[in-house]
Image (spheres, helix red, strand yellow):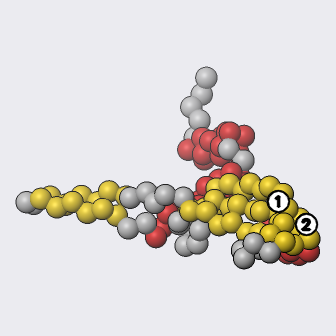
Amino acid sequence: MGEVGKDEFLWRLQQVEKELLPLEVKERALHRRTTLGFVLQNITWQIVVKKHDQSGARLPDIPYGCLSMVYASAQTTVAPLRLRAKGVSMELPTVREPKQLVLELHETDVYNMIESLKDLRENLQKLKKAK
């Protein structure tokens, strides 16, 4: 069996990489490592019916959605923990606890959010196709 040249080896390695790790997974991981904003970790929801306001006054049953989004601070903005001793300095990354945003959404708010997210998705898809 003959030796494989460097170009052939790199091409084969690239083909294996494509099969093992799809481009979308690589892009998402790279984005999460380099973003300056918050990183979404989880979304949960539940339906609630409001029957009273804070003063205890009775309200007509008002259904709404309670949307909970768990996010983490950007990895690039995490302040390192610096340890110094005589002649030695070491930086350790600190991990911030995930934070949570809870939104109480009327049905109209949910429709508006869905439409905004659809627009975002369509524009991302257009940009991807233009590549």
Which quadrant of the figure has residue 24?
Answer: bottom right
Residue 42 location in percent, x, y?
Answer: 68, 54
Query: Type of residue at label 1?
Result: Val
Using residue 18 as the reference point, say whether residue 39 is left or right of it: left
Residue 27 location in percent, x, y?
Answer: 66, 58
Q: Which residue is mark 1?
A: 48
The CA span between labels 2 and 1 is 10 Å
Query: Type of residue at label 2?
Result: Asp
Q: Which residue is mark 2?
A: 61
Using residue 37 as the reference point, say whether residue 62 is left or right of it: right
In front here: 25 or 16? Answer: 25
Residue shown at 53% from the left, 65% from the top = 73
Residue shown at 37% from the left, 58% from the top = 93
Residue 40 location in percent, x, y?
Answer: 65, 61
Using residue 92 as the reference point, say whether residue 15 is left or right of it: right
In front here: 96 or 27? Answer: 96
Residue 65 location in percent, x, y?
Answer: 83, 63
Q: Could one spot residue 31 in this view of the protein? A: no
Give the mark toward the camera: 2 or 1: 2
Q: Quadrant of the C terminus?
A: bottom right
Q: Tag 1: Cα neighbours inside 10 Å, few (<14), some, or many (≥20)?
A: some
Q: Which mark is first along the chain, 1 or 2? A: 1
Q: Could one spot residue 65 in this view of the protein? A: yes
Q: Quadrant of the N terminus?
A: top right
In front here: 77 or 44? Answer: 44
